[in-house]
Amino acid sequence: MTPPYLPFIFTLFVTSVVAALLAMYAWHRRTVPGGVYFAILMALLAEWSFVIAAELATVDLPTKVTWAKLAYPAVVSLGPLWFLFALAYGHRSTWITRRRIILLWIVPAGILGLALTNEWHGLVWPRITPTSDTPGAILNYEHGIAVWVNVVYAYTLLLIGTIIIVRTALRSGPLFRQQSRLLVVGVAIPWIANALYVANITPLPGLDLTPFAFTLTGLTVAWTIFRFHMLDIVPIARDTLIENMSDAVVVLDARNRVVDMNPVVRRLFSQQDGNVIGQPAQTVFARWPDVVNRYLNSTEEQTEVVIDMPDGKRWLDMRISSLYDRNRQLNGRLIVIREITARKDAEAVLQQYNRELEAHNAELDAFAHTVAHDLKNPLNLVLGYSALLLDFRAGLSDEEVQQTLDGLTRTAKKMDRIIDELLLLAGVRKLSNIQMETVDMAHIVSEAQKRLMDMIADTQAVISSPTVWPTVTSYTPWIEEVWVNYISNALKYGGAPPHIELGYDIVPDPAAPPGSQDEQSHVRFWVRDHGSGLTPESQAQLFVEFTRLDQARARGQGLGLSIVRRIVEKLGGQVGVDSQIGQGSTFFFTLPLRREPV
């Protein structure tokens, strides 16, 4: 071995060590994109440098050729590995499949096989000769066709991988641009050296400068790793960040033209797949001119807007941010839109629930007050009658005792009716589903009058009603309670003695379009008295819970008509009253008319 080779051998061993350390470092971070391919790349570089150093240190020619063959796994693999590393680093790993990796290595595997069997065909090295007569001199390898195939193949993959890294740098932040620049510079150095070797432009004839150049590549990559934390931080490509965001993203330039948008925008705004890039925002979003005109020139904005879509209104949370160039000149705007319709719907439901809760709390207060007031009077009567019997039973005649017992019975029944109506009101509030049926209205009216027999007899009322009633679909227990309330109300205020009329009319459904089959689809049942009538102000308060119009005359507990309203509305009808002072009152409720099948 000649002394001039010693510096080259030492440099190659240093290169091998550096590359091996980098391979170990990268392998520990193999979970990040490109880590595995970079680790293998550095490991092969270490092997290549070591083998070339061993070849320089060897004296006899056959052994030198053997070392040259052992370098070829690295020679043929660096191009494909760089390409795979670039794909992973640029977040294009979806391209990398097992089948494509196998196809990628077909050419390198074939060239490696030709190198190992070169003495049989000479396709890699047609002739191998020493560069001088000095023992251990560097060998001159003449390049065969297989070498040129590998050069074209490897350089093509090198070029594609470099383009991918450059595009990644252009779409990434400053940190990743620095990484990409250093990677490009680092990989360019050994490939330039390899090109010089292939072209036989070297300081020493036959000396391959590629391993030496990899020394600089190793140092460059080492600086990148420790200075910019490559393999700890990798760029997130635009396709990964923007395309896969759940929010809609629109980028406008300074002239309000659409520069970019992700697929969410098309789905959210029902945009077609036509090319909208470069078109004015007013054209792209022409269906919502109010929103566009209001916010188009906003530089910083965060607001909630509502837009009309074919499937209904949609609520959007919109954030607008300005984009500036290095000179702080406005370069465009970034608009990030998130649909919040579900949240708004939930808020509306919650607000409605809060309103209902407040109303229920108010009703509960009034309920407690009314129950206490209305039960207290009959309870005092019960206590009074009971005390009378206890204290003066011996001095009362049989007739007086009977009157006292009758008073106890009437008062107990009144308390029972109060409790029944309170329980019915609670049931109407809570019941969500009832079994609707065809009801026999004549039978219901008859049963309601039977329940009021005592009151009818006491007031000597005269009640007239039709012999035939229309057929409706409803719920018998509730409808009976409606009639009981209306008739009892007429008995109280319908004159002395009351003259009460019961009847019905077929009326239009306010919700049905004129001329339709369902226009005459409701029955209005009514109870008419000939009492003193009601003022408009009193009529407005009739069906309000726990409200009593005339405390002096009222013998009910102020719940009856509110129960009627709740029942009828739940059955799909309406309640109301027509009244004039001095001409009596007509209380009515409506129910859907049952149509017989044709």
Image: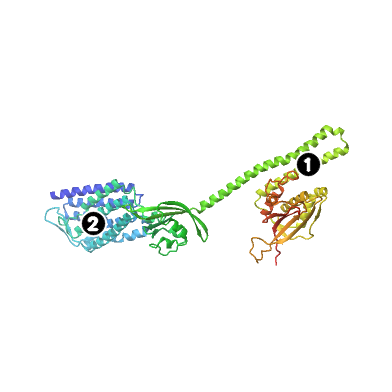
Name the amino acid, label 1: Thr
Q: Is residue 63 left or right of residue 374?
A: left
Residue plotted at (86% across, 38% down): 400
Q: Is residue 390 left or right of residue 128?
A: right
Residue 111 percent location from the top left of the image: 26, 60
Vertical order, 274 against 357 (above or below):
below
Residue 19 percent location from the top left of the image: 26, 49
Mark count: 2
Q: Secondary structure at mark 2?
A: helix
What residue is shown with label 2? 191
Screen quadrant of the C terminus: bottom right
Residue 246 visible in rendering: no
Q: Secondary structure at mark 1?
A: helix
Residue 345 visible in rendering: yes
Mark 1 to mark 2 CA distance (whole Å)? 111 Å
Please tell me in which quadrant of the rendered image residue 88 appears: bottom left
Q: Residues within 10 Å of mark 1 (few under 14, many from 20)?
A: some
Name the amino acid, label 2: Trp
Residue plotted at (63% across, 64% down): 513
Residue 190 percent location from the top left of the image: 23, 54
Q: Residues within 10 Å of mark 2 (few under 14, many from 20)?
A: many
Which of the two labelled residues, at mark 1 and mark 2, occupies the earlier sequence position?
2
Residue 473 percent location from the top left of the image: 70, 58
Residue reaching furthest left?
A: 133
Name the colouring of the figure: rainbow
Report the mark closest to the observer, 1 or 2.
1
Foreground pick, 157 / 69? 157
- Residue 411 got which mark? 1
Q: Is residue 396 left or right of residue 593?
A: right
